[in-house]
């Protein structure tokens, strides 16, 4: 078993133009059918936009979903480790410190917005 990354092009028309493509992680298994190598899809693990790889919150959401999907498969610990290494090559797993810092920044931004709104409504 290993992780195959699929790349899907984004539509770059109109006001919703975004840079990069979508990346999808799929757990596949190699097998031979009629003597030819084929890939059998086991489970879709998660997807993320290429432009969101630098955002801690989006990486955390990707990893939460990927781990839930791996838990549903009941993988052997060695296989699970190989899958995690394959995922981390593209989407680095955020550390607890990164997550805490991101949450603090988000809360600070929300407080600033609330203050601006309360000043504007007076």
Image (cartoon, rainbow, N blue to C red):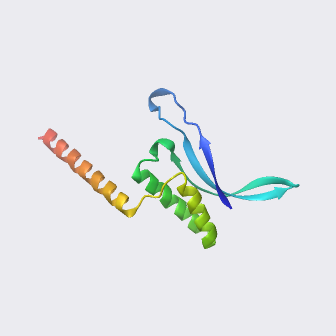
Residue ID at (46%, 32%):
16
The residue at the far top in this view is 14
Residue 63 screen position, x and y as percent: 49, 58
Using the image as rendered, state which of residue 52 and residue 12 is in the foreground: 52
Which residue is more in the foreground, 36 or 115?
36
The answer to which image quadrant residue 96 occupies is bottom left
Is residue 122 left or right of 63 when viewed as pictured? left
Residue 28 in which image quadrant: bottom right
- Residue 116 at x, y percent in the picture: 18, 42
The residue sitting at 23% across, 45% down in the picture is 113
Residue 86 in view, yes or no: yes
User: Residue sitting at 47 percent across and 31 percent down?
Assistant: 17
Whether 11 is drawn above or below 85: the answer is above
In the depicted structure, whether residue 17 falls above or below residue 84: above
* Residue farthest toward the left in the current orientation of the protein: 122
Which of the image's four quarters has the N terminus?
Answer: bottom right
Q: Position of residue 49 (x, y in %)?
A: 50, 44
The answer to whether 4 is drawn above or below residue 8 in the figure is: below
Left or right of 75 in this view: 63? left
Q: Residue furthest right?
A: 34
- What residue appears at the point 88 percent right and 55 percent down from the top-left corner? 35
Task: For the C terminus, give its image quadrant.
Answer: top left
Residue 25 position within the rendered picture, expressed as x and y whole percent measured from the top left:
59, 52
| Left-right relation of 112 to 24 | left
């Amino acid at each position: 078993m290993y992780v195959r990354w699929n790349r899907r092009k984004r539509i770059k028309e109109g006001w919703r133009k975004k840079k990069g493509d979508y990346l999808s992680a799929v757990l596949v298994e190699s097998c031979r059918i009629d003597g030819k190598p084929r890939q059998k899809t086991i489970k879709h693990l998660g997807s993320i936009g290429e432009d969101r790889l630098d955002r801690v919150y989006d990486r955390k959401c990707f990893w939460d979903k990927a781990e839930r999907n791996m838990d549903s498969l009941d993988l052997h610990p060695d296989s699970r480790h190989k899958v995690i290494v394959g995922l981390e090559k593209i989407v680095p797993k955020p550390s607890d410190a990164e997550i805490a810092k991101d949450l603090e920044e988000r809360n600070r931004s929300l407080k600033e917005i609330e203050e601006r709104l309360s000043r504007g409504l007076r």
